[in-house]
Image: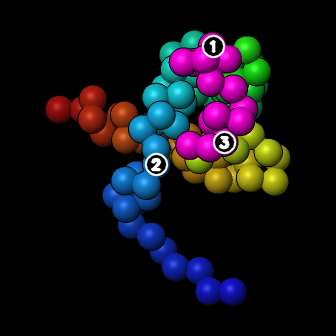
Amino acid sequence: MVTALIPRAAIMETLNPVVCDFVLFCINRQGKEWPALYDEMCWVAGHRLFRGMGYTELSKVGLSFALNDIEDTIRMVDMVTTDKLRIQQP
């Protein structure tokens, strides 16, 4: 298997804005410390607290809660939080 480094900007462009908004919604509720944030994300999805979206709907826009995909989920959260910090800095 060949792996290639993908520029961060290209990855951010591929993140669905709904995923970004969901992650930020959960961070605002819980903070960004892992694994508490993952627990909050699961809670929010399980109770459809974000735009009425649950696990299935969030999966359709690119966010997986499966443990075998956890590294991808962590990378998405990191990209969202890093991008948010970059935007907030002057």
Residue depicted at 62% across the width and 43% down the height: 60
Amino acid type assigned to the residue bearing label 1 in the image:
Leu
Residue 44: x percent and y percent? Answer: 68, 19
Residue depicted at 46% across the width and 48% down the height: 15
Q: Which mark is residue 16?
A: none
Query: Mark 3 = which residue?
Result: 59
61 to the left or right of 34: left
Residue 59 figure quarter: top right
Q: Which mark is residue 49?
A: 1
Compare residues 73 and 46 and report the one nearer the observer: 46
77 to the left or right of 73: left
Of callouts 1 and 2, the N-terminal one: 2
Compare residues 38 and 58 and report the one nearer the observer: 58
Quote the CA–CA distance across marks 3 and 1.
Answer: 15 Å
Amino acid type assigned to the residue bearing label 3 in the image:
Ser
Give the label, 2 or 3, closer to the camera.
Answer: 3
- The crowding category of the residue bearing disc 1, from other C-alpha atoms within 10 Å (few below 14, some 14 to 19, many at least 20), is some
Q: Which mark is residue 15?
A: 2
Residue depicted at 72% across the width and 32% down the height: 55
Q: Is residue 36 visible?
A: no
Of callouts 2 and 3, the N-terminal one: 2
Indicate yes or no whether the magenta region holds residue 57: yes
- The crowding category of the residue bearing disc 2, from other C-alpha atoms within 10 Å (few below 14, some 14 to 19, many at least 20), is some
Of callouts 3 and 1, the N-terminal one: 1
Q: Are marks 2 and 3 in contact (CB under 8 Å)?
A: no
